Image (cartoon, grey):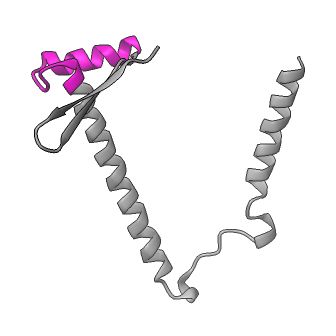
Amino acid sequence: MVVQWNTMRGPSMTVHKQSVSFTDAAFAFARELVEAGEYPNVSAAVSGEMARAKAARDRERKLLEAEVQRRLALPPDQWEPVAALGTFTSNAREHLARLKAAQENSATS
C-alpha cells in the first residue's frame, strides 16, 4: 500500500508525502548525512540528494547537447567515419539477438 498526501509550504512549494522503502545502505547514507549536520532529517536528506542528482543529470544533459551541437556544426570534411553503413548497428543487433535467445531459453526451462 502506498500512502500519499500533499501539503503546502509557502506560496509555491508543494510537499508530497509518500511512504517509501530504502535498502539498508541507502538508509544508512541518509542517516549519515543527517548526523553530519548536512540535513535536519532523513526526509530532507532524501529530497536534497534527489535535487542534487537531478542537477547533475541536467548538467550532463546540457554538456551532451552542447557537444552534439558542436559536432553537428563541423564541416563534413572534418567528420570521422564510425563504421560502414551496413555494419553500423550489427554489433548491437547481435547482442540483442543473444539476449532474446537467452530470455526465450530461460522461459522454456
Quarter residue 63 falls in? bottom left
- The residue shown at (40%, 57%) is 61
- Residue 4 position within the rendered picture, expressed as x and y whole percent measured from the top left: 35, 23
In front of the other: 88 or 25: 25
- Residue 105 position within the rendered picture, expressed as x and y whole percent measured from the top left: 87, 26
- The residue shown at (46%, 83%) is 73
**Residue 31 is a magenta residue:** yes
Task: Answer above or below: position of 28 versus 5.
Answer: above
Q: Which SS type dominates the magenta stretch?
A: helix
Q: Give the range drawn in magenta.
A: 22-44
Task: Answer above or below: position of 50 versus 39.
Answer: below
- The residue shown at (76%, 71%) is 84
In this picture, residue 64 sits left or right of residue 50: right
**Residue 71 is a magenta residue:** no
Q: Quadrant where the C terminus lies?
A: top right
In this picture, residue 98 sits left or right of residue 88: right
In front of the other: 24 or 4: 4
Q: Give the number of callouts.
A: 0
- Residue 11 position within the rendered picture, expressed as x and y whole percent measured from the top left: 12, 43
In this picture, residue 72 sits left or right of residue 37: right
- The residue shown at (83%, 22%) is 106
In front of the other: 61 or 83: 61
